[in-house]
Image (tube, rainbow, N blue to C red):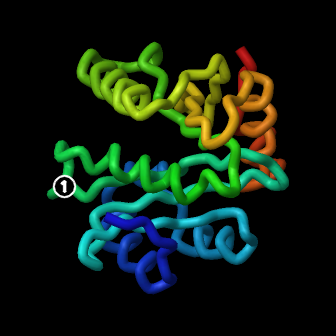
């Protein structure tokens, strides 16, 4: 298995065949937005390949002048789920990012805000997966419109403090969404 940066053609294929279907419509950035962020050097897209066949992908948001990068999307294609690929992807991603970043951040839906027991179990399983893959859970929380998240981290060379994570998130969100959207729709709580 290998991780490699996706070409525009590969990104188009993944967007049309997977990303637009793997996430709720409200969570999917437009293809135009993703491509513009790549041009602006705010975003990077990796594919995970086995024998030149894609098995999944990870899209990430760069923090401007920061030591952090935020995992935006991580997907194992449906036919490969429950086979350990997600852990392999995270290991490959860690190897790819460790030379440039000090830590990887991610948002996970906060189980405390689940609407059903099934939803709570899914959220808890997702957190357990990341913890199994050496992610720590920070005290930093965020709210994007109506969704509540715990911010988790994977050290790539340094273990961030809650203050580091808070600072990174308060730079990443407005960098991607713009100051106006940030001020109206996003809240980051340091503890």
Residue shown at 80% from the left, 44% from the top: 171
Q: Quadrant of the N terminus?
A: bottom left
Residue shown at 31% from the left, 26% from the top: 125
- Residue 109 in the image, given as x and y percentages of width and height: 47, 29
Compared with 140, 15 (above or below) is below
Nearest the camera: 32 or 153? 153
Kindly indicate the quadrant of the structure image that contains residue 52.
Answer: bottom left
Compared with 154, 49 (above or below) is below
Nearest the camera: 151 or 153? 153
Residue shown at 64% from the left, 28% from the top: 142
For label 1, the residue is 80
Residue shown at 45% from the left, 76% from the top: 11
- Residue 17 in the image, given as x and y percentages of width and height: 30, 71
Residue furthest to the bottom in view is: 9
Q: Note whether residue 173 is visible.
A: no
Q: Left of 74 or right of it: where is 67? A: right
């Amino acid at each position: 298995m290998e991780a490699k940066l996706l070409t525009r053609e590969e990104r188009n294929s993944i967007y049309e065949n997977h990303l637009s279907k793997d996430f709720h419509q409200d969570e999917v950035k437009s293809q135009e937005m993703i491509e513009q962020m790549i041009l602006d050097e705010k975003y990077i897209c990796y594919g995970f390949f086995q024998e030149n066949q894609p098995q999944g992908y990870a899209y990430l948001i760069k923090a401007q002048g920061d030591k952090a990068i935020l995992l935006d999307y991580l997907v194992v294609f449906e036919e490969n789920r429950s086979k350990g690929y997600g852990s392999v992807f995270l290991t490959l991603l860690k190897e790819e990012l460790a030379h440039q970043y000090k830590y990887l951040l991610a948002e996970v839906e906060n189980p405390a805000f689940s609407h059903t027991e099934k939803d709570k179990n899914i959220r808890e399983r997702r957190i357990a997966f990341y913890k199994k893959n050496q992610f720590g859970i920070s005290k930093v929380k965020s709210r994007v419109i109506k969704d509540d998240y715990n911010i988790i981290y994977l050290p790539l060379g340094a273990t961030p403090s809650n203050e580091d994570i808070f600072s990174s998130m308060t730079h990443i969100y407005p960098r991607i969404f713009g100051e106006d959207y940030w001020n109206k729709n996003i809240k980051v709580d340091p503890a």
